[in-house]
Image (cartoon, rainbow, N blue to C red):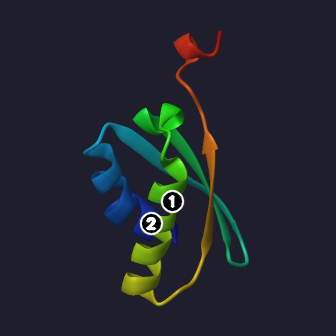
Amino acid sequence: MENYINNVLKPKIQGDGGEITFLSRDGDKVTVLMQGECSKCHILDRCLEWAEQQIEKDTGEKVRLEGIRKKPYFQDV
């Protein structure tokens, strides 16, 4: 799953100014760190649903993505 996120999803999300990083997997729950534009995006839930669909389509695995938003240090004030 980490390979798929890094090699397939990450470049697509980076194309929109975002960043996704695999953190962990526990059964069907995959936790990812969302940074860049993703950290402040109002439709992040829809993007994660899209990513879940892509994972299922390409790998046959049905997972649930949990995104943790991490703003850049200068926005944490």
User: Residue at horizontal 46%, vertical 39%?
Assistant: 38
Residue where numbered disc 2 is placed: 51
Q: Are marks 1 and 2 in contact (CB under 8 Å)?
A: yes
* 44 versus 54 height, above or below: above
Mark 2: amino acid: Ala
Q: Secondary structure at mark 1?
A: helix
Residue where numbered disc 1 is placed: 48
The percent position of residue 22, horizontal first and vertical second, equals: 55, 56
Mark 1: amino acid: Leu
User: Residue at horizontal 48%, vertical 57%?
Assistant: 46
| Position of residue 33 in the picture relative to residue 56 (left or right) | right
Q: Secondary structure at mark 2?
A: helix
Q: CA distance from mark 1 to mark 2?
A: 5 Å
The percent position of residue 66, horizontal first and vertical second, equals: 65, 58
User: Residue at horizontal 32%, vertical 37%?
Assistant: 17
Q: Residues within 10 Å of mark 1 (few under 14, many from 20)?
A: some
Q: Residues within 10 Å of mark 2 (few under 14, many from 20)?
A: some
